[in-house]
Image (cartoon, rainbow, N blue to C red):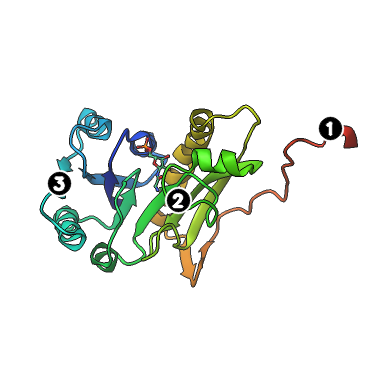
């Protein structure tokens, strides 16, 4: 059983998926605290509905390091082992990373290392990629640069908008974040430099996707 601290800034649909998977017994973890840097966000409401301890930590008057120090104290006070960034829209400093080395995970709505940063749905469409996706990674000192744990791929369609692509990617986020946490809880993740090996986890099927699909080649 791994003790989680979940950091949020918004709607918290990833938080919800993790809560649901824990409650269904699919993830062997316990959410010890939900921390938001923004008051009144729906993620806090979700925490409340499920009886989870939740806190708002405001950054007003604090520099980034001081802010992270407060977050670290709140996490340590609840015996948190793994920090889960679930739509937490703040840059993390080494203060947090040193307190939880290779124990901070983030989810990003793109196939890293492509399209780091925020609000990348339209960026992916405008770039013209035929596949998009999402990535769960350990956080290091760069922005969206840490070792990759798991990724899911989705197609991009000609008629996509940022909203439709976001919805397609989010569905996969809700699966892979819980899977990453469960693999961690089972002690299966082994970090070797940039690579995260998933010990004892079945290999992905040796398959492929082509977009647009290969119609005239006979499927
Ligand atoms: C998710 O799409 C997540 O990938 C993204 O914020 C959204 C949070 O949604 N995170 C980032 O862009 C981090 N750079 P949620 O609040 O409904 O879970």
Residue 198 coordinates in the image, percent (x, y):
52, 59
Question: Counting residues from the N terminus, which is met first, the one under dot 2 or under dot 1?
Answer: 2
Density class for disc 2 (Cα within 10 Å; few <14, some 14-19, many ≥20) is: many
Answer yes or no: do the residues labelled 3 and 2 have beta carbons within 8 Å?
Answer: no
Tell me the SS state at disc 3: loop
Mark 2 or mark 1: which is in front?
Answer: 1
Tell me the quarter of the image containing the C terminus: top right
Q: Quadrant of ligand 1?
A: top left
Pointer 3: what residue? 58
Inspect this view and state whether residue 1 appears.
no
Q: Residue at x 17, y 56 (%)?
A: 67
The disc at residue 215 is: 1
169 vs 4, nearest the viewer:
169
- Looking at mark 3, is its residue's CB closer than 8 Å to ligand 1? no
Tell me the SS state at disc 1: helix
106 vs 9, nearest the viewer:
9
CA–CA distance in space, label 3 to label 2? 28 Å
CA–CA distance in space, label 1 to label 3? 54 Å
């Amino acid at each position: 059983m791994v003790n989680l601290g979940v950091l949020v800034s918004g709607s918290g649909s990833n938080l919800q998926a993790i809560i649901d998977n824990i409650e269904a017994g699919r993830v062997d973890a316990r959410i010890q605290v939900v921390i938001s840097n923004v008051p009144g966000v729906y993620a806090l409401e979700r925490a409340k509905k499920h009886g989870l301890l939740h806190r708002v930590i405001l950054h007003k008057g604090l520099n980034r390091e001081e802010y992270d120090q407060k977050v670290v104290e709140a996490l340590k006070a609840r015996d948190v082992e793994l920090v889960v960034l679930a739509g937490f829209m703040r840059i993390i400093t080494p203060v947090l990373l040193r307190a939880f080395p290779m124990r901070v995970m983030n989810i990003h709505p793109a196939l890293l290392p492509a399209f780091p940063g925020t609000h990348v749905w339209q960026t992916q469409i405008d770039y013209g990629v035929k596949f998009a996706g999402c990535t769960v990674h350990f956080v290091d000192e760069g922005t969206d640069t840490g070792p990759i744990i798991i990724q899911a791929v989705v197609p991009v369609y000609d008629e996509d908008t940022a909203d439709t692509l976001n919805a397609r990617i989010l569905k996969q986020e809700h699966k892979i974040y819980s899977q990453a946490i469960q693999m961690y809880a089972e002690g299966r993740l082994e970090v070797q430099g940039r690579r995260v090996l998933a010990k004892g986890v079945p290999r992905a099927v040796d398959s492929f996707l082509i977009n647009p699909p290969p119609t005239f080649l006979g499927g």
